[in-house]
Image (tube, coloured by chain):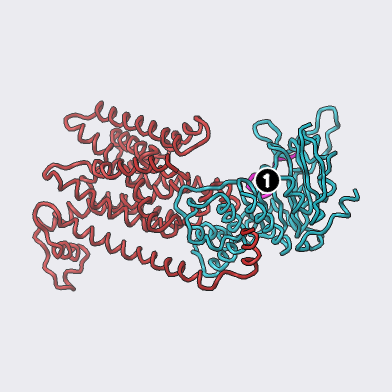
Amino acid sequence: MRALAETTTARGSSAPAGSGAPAGTRLSRAWLALPVAAVVLVLSIGVAVTIGPADLALSEVGRSLATHLGLSGPLGLEPLTALRDGMVWQLRMPRILTAAAVGAGLALCGAVMQSLTRNPLADPYLLGLSSGASLGAVLVLLAGVPLLLPVAAFVGAVGALALALSLAGALGAITPTRTVLAGLAISQLCAAAVSFVIFWSAKGDAFREVLSWLMGSVASATWTSVAIAGGAVLVLGTLLALTGSVLDAFTFGETAAAALGVPVNRARWILLIGVALLTGALVSQSGSIGFVGLILPHAVRLFTGARHRLLLPLSALAGASFLVWADTLARTVFEPRELPVGIVTAAIGAPVFAFLLWRGNHR
Amino acid sequence: MSAATDLPALAPQAPSARRGGLTAERVTWEISGRLILDDVGVLAPTGAVTGLLGPNGSGKSTLLRVLAGVQQAGRAAPPSADLPSPVAQPGPTTAFDGADLAALPRRERARVLALVEQDATTDLPLSVLDAVLLGRIPHRSLLAGDSDADRTAAHAALATAGAGDLADREVGTLSGGERQRVHMARALAQDPRLLLLDEPTNHLDIAAQLHAMRVLRDLAADGVTVVAALHDLNHAASTCDHLVLLDQGRVVASGPVGDVLVPEVLEPVYGVRVDVLTHPRTGRPVLSFDRD
C-alpha cells in the first residue's frame, strides 16, 4: 500500500523545486577542486625542486625558470650561478616534471580501465600493460634503436593487454578476479623476461637497470623524457579525459551502455588502445611504476563520486602531485641512496590494494 | 473467445491501440548453433502494456535485447532441405511507429526506446541522482555535462518511479526494490516512447511488485508503448493489455489477455494445470496452478 500511495501522489507533480539546487551547488563546489588541485600540483613541483642537497630556495627555482623562459630581463631578476641553475634546470626540473606527467597519465589510465572493465582492481600495472611496455622498451634498447622506444613500449603494452584479456576469457566469463589473476601472470612473465634480457646482455650494474625498469624510476629523466611523457599526457590524456560521458554510460555494464546509444565495441577498443598508447609512452620513460593507476582513481572517487567528467581530470592532477612527492621521498629518505620510486608507491599502494580486495569480498 | 471481448477495461483507461507501436517480424537469434529465437513476431500496440511470457529459457530476455538493438537480430534460419528454398527470404524487421529501429542511429534509437535490465549493478560509489542522470546521455552532446534541464528531468523520473526520496542515497546501499525503481527512473529519464523491461518485478516484495506494475500502467496511459517480460502470470492477468507467449524460442500464442491466459494455451507450455478464475472486484482473470 505504501508503494502504491507513493506513486499516486508523486506522479504528475514534477520534482520539488528545491531538490535540484543542493545538487547544483554541491556540483559546482566539487568543480572547484580542479583549480585547487592544479595549484597544489604547481606548488608541489616548485617545492619538490628545492628539496634535496644544496638548499635551494623557492625564489631560486623561480629565477631559474624565468631565465630559461627569457623573462629574467623584463622582470629584472638575477640569473643563478651556472652550478645552481644546472641543478634546477638540468637535474631536478626534468625529473620532477617527468614524475608529474607519468603520475598524471597512470592515474588517468587506471581510472579509464577501471570504468571500462567495471573492475575496481584494473590498472596498467596489475593487468600487465606496464611490464609488457617495459619488455618492449628493453628489447629495442638492446637492439640499439632507442628512437623506437615509445613505439616498442606501446606494442609491448598492447600485447600484454591482449594476452591478459584472452587468458582471462579462456578461464571463463571475464570477472574482475580472473582478469587480475591473468594480468598478474602476464605481468610476472614479462617482468621475468625483462630481467632475463638485461642479465643476459648487460654487465656490471645490470641489477640497477633491472630494478629501474621493473620498479620504475625517473632518476635519469631528461628534457626528452619530459617531452615524450608530457606530450603523451597532454595529447592522449586530454582525449581520454574528454570521454567522461562515454565511460559514464558503461557504469551499469555494456548492455546498458549500448541501450544508452554508445557504440560499445568501438568505444572499448579505442579507449583501451588509447590507454595502451599512453602507458607505453610513460613506461618508456619511467619503467613500470605500480599502484598509481590503482589507488589514485579510488581516492578521487571518494570525493567526486563515480561520474567521470570531474573524476578523470582530477585523477590526473592528483596522480601528478602524488608521484612528484613519491619520487621526492624516493630520492631523499635514504639520501644519498636512491630508491626506485616504485618501492615508495608499492609501500603506499599495496595496503590500499589489500583493502580493496578485502572490501570486494565483503560486499 | 468471449473472455477477450468481455474483459473489463483497466483503470486508468488505456487509449485505444492506434495503428503504430512496436512491430517485430522474423526475429531469429542463435548462440553457438543453438537457436534461442526462431522466427519470432511481436506486436506491441502504442499506449498499451504488452506482456512477454514464457518459461525459463524461452527467449524472453534475448528477445528484449534484440528489440532494444543491443543484440543484432540474425537472419531467419535457413529452410529445411526438403522445402524449396524461397528466392529471397526477407530478413528480420523491428519497426516502431513506422520507423525501422535497426536502421536508426544508436543515439537516436536511445532517445526512442529504453531498456530496463534485470539486476544491473555497479561496484562504484554512485548516487541515485547520478545513476538516473545517465539516462540523459543520449539527449546531450557527449562532451556536455548535466544541464539544469537534465537534472529536472532526472528528478521528475525519480518521482514517477516512486523513488523521489532516494535521490541522495548511494546505489550500492539500496534494497532490491529500491534499486529496481532507480533503474526504472533511469529508463524514464531517457524520455522513451518505447519502454522494454526484463522482469521488472523480480526479487521485489508484493507491494513493490504492485507498485512496479502500476507505474507501467500509468506510463501506458501517457502513451508510452510498454513491453515487459514477466514471470508472474497473475501480474500479466491483472495489468497487461496484450500478451505474447514464447516457448523454446517460438511464439506459441499472442493477443489480448483473454485469448492467451486460457488453460488450453498455458498448460502445454508450462506443464502445469491451470484454472482461470475471475477476480471478484476487478473482473480480471486470476490464475491458479496445480501439478497434474
Residue A354, placed above or below residue B6: above
Q: Residue at x 35, y 63 (%)?
A: A34
Residue A283, placed above or below residue A189: below
Q: Position of residue B163 (x, y in %)?
A: 57, 60
- Position of residue B141 in the picture relative to residue A44 (left or right): right
Give the amino acid type for the residue marked by disc 1 in the picture: Val
Q: Residue at x 13, y 54 (%)?
A: A87
Q: Which chain is cyan?
A: B
Examine the structure image and report whether residue B257 is included in the region drawn in magenta: no
Specify the subunit that label 1 lies on.
B
- Position of residue B229 in the picture relative to residue B164 (left or right): right
Of helix, strand and loop, which one carries label 1? Answer: helix
- Which picture quadrant has residue A191? top left
Figure quadrant of the N terminus of chain A? bottom right
Q: Colour of chain A?
A: red
In the orientation shown, which residue stands out farthest toward the front?
B280
Residue at numbered disc 1: B66
Examine the structure image and report whether residue B74 is included in the region drawn in magenta: yes
The reply to whether residue A175 is visible in this rendering is: yes
Figure quadrant of the C terminus of chain A? top left
Q: Position of residue A155 (x, y in %)?
A: 40, 39
Q: What residue span does the magenta drawing correspond to?
A: B67-76
